[in-house]
Image: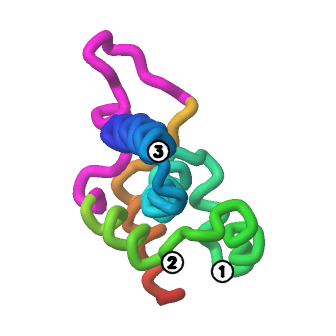
Amino acid sequence: VWVEDLATDIQHFEAFADGTGVGQLRECFVEVKCLATALLDKDLPALLLPENSNIRRKRYPFLSLDKVHSVLEKYAGTGLGEKLMARGSGIIKNDFLMLEKKEVIQLTKIVRMQL
């Protein structure tokens, strides 16, 4: 859920940036927005495979594999599963990327090989 919250926060930052009149301030959030959006994408595991690097770059041109690797390492011990995606109501949003611990570990290895 923290990624969804981050994506929402970024939208608010962009709206604020647009309201300041500083032309390029919005661009400061491009990389973090790309990371948050990618981490919510159910297709991310396939996009992280080396053979899909061109598709990944087209969909997420500002995505840093270093940063994806850092996030995956953080969740290698727990996974990005139901515990993290459930809200207080107990409803699980199935539109999120959900990975079990072993899947996170495998993706971490795949990304590390590309760094």
Q: Is residue 45 above or below residue 13?
A: below
Q: Is residue 64 visible?
A: yes
For this rendering, which residue is in front, 4 or 11?
11
Q: Residues within 10 Å of mark 3 (few under 14, many from 20)?
A: some
Q: Is residue 103 visible?
A: no
- Tag 1 and tag 2, C-beta contact below 8 Å: yes
- Tag 3 and tag 1, C-beta contact below 8 Å: no
Tell me, for residue 50, which label it has, or none.
1
- C-alpha distance separating marks 3 and 1: 32 Å
Location of residue 58 (image quadrant): bottom right
The amino acid type of the residue labelled 1 equals Pro
Of helix, strand and loop, which one carries label 1?
helix
- Where is residue 27 drawn, in percent x and y? 51, 61
Position of residue 85 in the picture relative to residue 34 (left or right): left
Q: Which residue is mark 2?
A: 110
- C-alpha distance separating marks 1 and 2: 8 Å
The range drawn in magenta is 75-94
For this rendering, which residue is in front, 106 or 69?
69
Position of residue 61 in the picture relative to residue 51 (left or right): left
The amino acid type of the residue labelled 2 equals Ile
The amino acid type of the residue labelled 3 equals Glu
Position of residue 7 in the picture relative to residue 43 (left or right): left
Q: Residue furthest top?
A: 89
- Tag 3 and tag 2, C-beta contact below 8 Å: no
Q: Is residue 81 magenta?
A: yes
For this rendering, which residue is in front, 64 or 93?
64
Tell me, for residue 14, which label it has, or none.
3
Name the residue located 41 percent from the left edge and 40 percent from the top edge: 16
Of helix, strand and loop, which one carries label 3?
helix
